[in-house]
Image: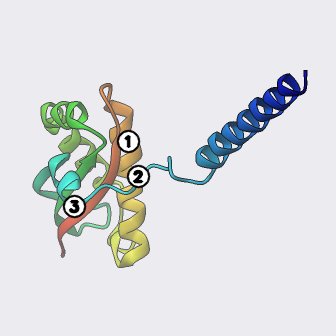
């Protein structure tokens, strides 16, 4: 009888310890998604070569992008949709004035707008980041 109570207490303590370990591991942040390595960024990125567009302010811009996708399928889809992406870029730029693109804030807004609009096209994945790799505004 004493052995049964001792055994039951030992099992209960072990169970409580196991549950506590699972909870601590789950909520400690070890399962957080980590930032991709530069090799992963490059592996899932697509280069958009130089695009020249007229701006609404009668200026023009030559600009290139690197677009990072979330996985290989998204990259493959983006490569197939490159003509649609270029069309979106030209349309977006044609609505902007030179002042809208100048400076860090303008470039970040352009990147975010393009990311949102390109994600609207995507079916096999999503765009993680749009990078401006070259820009000449005249």
Please report whichever mark, 1 or 3, sits nearer to the chain's N-terminal start. 3
Marks 1/3: CA–CA distance: 25 Å
User: Helix or strand or loop: what does disc 1 sit on?
Assistant: helix
How has the structure been colored for display?
rainbow
Which labelled disc corresponds to residue 38? 3
The percent coordinates of residue 64 (x first, y second) are 15, 60
Q: Nearer the viewer, residue 72 or 57?
A: 72
Per the image, the residue denoted by label 1 is 117
The percent coordinates of residue 112 (x first, y second) are 41, 55
The percent coordinates of residue 33 (x first, y second) are 44, 49
Q: Identify the residue shown where x is 22% and y is 61%.
A: 38
Depth check, mark 1 against mark 3: the one in front is 3
Q: Identify the residue shown where x is 39% and y is 34%.
A: 120
Per the image, the residue denoted by label 2 is 113
The percent coordinates of residue 19 (x first, y second) are 70, 37
Does 80 appear above or below 114?
above
* Number of other residues with Cα within 10 Å of mark 2, as a class: few under 14, some 14 to 19, many 20 or more: some
In the rendered image, the quadrant that contains the N terminus is: top right
Q: Identify the residue shown where x is 13% and y is 52%.
A: 47
Depth check, mark 3 against mark 2: the one in front is 3
């Amino acid at each position: 009888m004493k052995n049964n109570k001792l055994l039951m207490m030992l099992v209960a303590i072990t169970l409580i310890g196991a549950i506590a370990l699972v909870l601590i591991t789950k909520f400690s942040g070890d399962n957080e998604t980590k930032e991709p390595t530069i090799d992963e960024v490059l592996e899932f990125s697509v280069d958009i070569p130089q695009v020249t567009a007229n701006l609404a302010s009668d200026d023009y811009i030559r600009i290139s992008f690197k677009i990072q996708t979330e996985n290989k399928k998204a990259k493959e889809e983006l490569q197939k949709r490159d003509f649609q992406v270029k069309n979106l870029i030209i349309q977006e730029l044609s609505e902007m004035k030179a002042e809208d693109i100048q400076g860090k804030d303008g470039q970040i807004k352009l990147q975010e707008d393009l990311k949102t609009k390109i994600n609207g096209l995507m079916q096999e994945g999503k765009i993680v980041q749009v990078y401006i790799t070259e820009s000449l505004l005249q």
